[in-house]
Amino acid sequence: MSSTAPAHDLFLGRYRPVRPLGSGGMGHVWLARDEQSGLDVALKIVPREGKAGHRAEREARAAAALRHRRCQRILALAHDSSHVYIAYEYVPGRTFREALRAGAITDNAALEVAAQIADALAHAHGRGIVHRDVKPSNVLLAQHSDAQSEGIDVRLLDFGLAQMAEFDTLTALGDVPGTLAYISPERLQGLTATEAADVWAVGVLLWEALAGQHPFWGGDLSHTSRLIQQGAPPLETMRPDLPRHVLDTVGSALLVNPQRRPAAEKLGRTPEQAGRASEKRGRTPEQAGRASGKRGRTPEQRGRTGAKR
């Protein structure tokens, strides 16, 4: 599927492409107008070849099972002989990764984002769905034109790797789907992903946002894998100025033993309360990165395993 399409084309006889929103290994996402409803949608178009088509349909099934404001809502699923089409609600904004790159995330904002991600995950986990690919580029920070909606409003995207009930146990590093930098130690050891793996990913995301650099990246995939299995350095080594309850929250999500990590529901309450209670200097990842002298490509850019994104 080309990333460009004639403006007069209608996908499935109802979706008129407006402009491309992005692309990846699975396919392309377009901003499209639903000629039947008059609504703008985010239309994901995935070729039905290899595992991509199956993954797209699994994403749609997972998303359709969720009814939560923090989970991007699916509107329709369809396919023809060559492609799978998923129509999602269109929410303008930017990803958490883009906001981090821009140095636009303060400590309190990072804690609020983590709390809202955990809230979405608690909803999914309660329905037997493990996301398995939580990372900054799969977190959308909604942009609202309403002046009364100036707060952070998160949408958790891309349930394409979601595990519903039981799937095959992973047996090798090369079989681990998603971005290596946010994968939990137990998954690298070949164990099936559980809810605790999603909690770990939120912990990594929060550590990265507060420290201004990633806790594990610094070498090749093999080196990164070894660092993940050793566990993250204590966040206080980078941010000794943070309140104890914030450090404890991040540390609990990054416990190597998955059985000792908090449930997403509990994790969602703790960062939110910590963010409201703390009065910090508003330090951003950009400032933290300058202080440490460590900047560079993001984990998503520097290495992936399994399905290309």
Image (cartoon, rainbow, N blue to C red):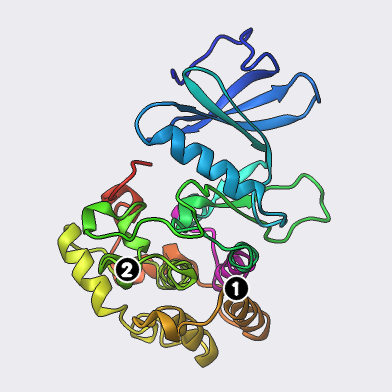
Image spot of residue 96 (x, y percent):
52, 55
Answer whether residue 102 is magenta in the image.
yes
- Residue 191 numbered mark, or none: 2
Please indicate, yes or no, whether residue 168 appears anywhere in the rendered image: yes
Residue at the limit of the structure toward the bottom, as seen here: 244
Image spot of residue 33 (x, y percent):
71, 23
- Residue 236 numbered mark, or none: none
Residue marked by disc 1: 108
Quadrant, the N terminus: top left
Quadrant, the C terminus: top left
Answer whether residue 178 is magenta in the image.
no
Residue beneath the point at 48% across and 88% down? 248
Kind of residue sitting beneath label 2: Leu
Image spot of residue 104 (x, y percent):
54, 58
Q: Is residue 199 left or right of residue 116?
A: left
Please indicate, yes or no, whether residue 24 appears anywhere in the rendered image: no
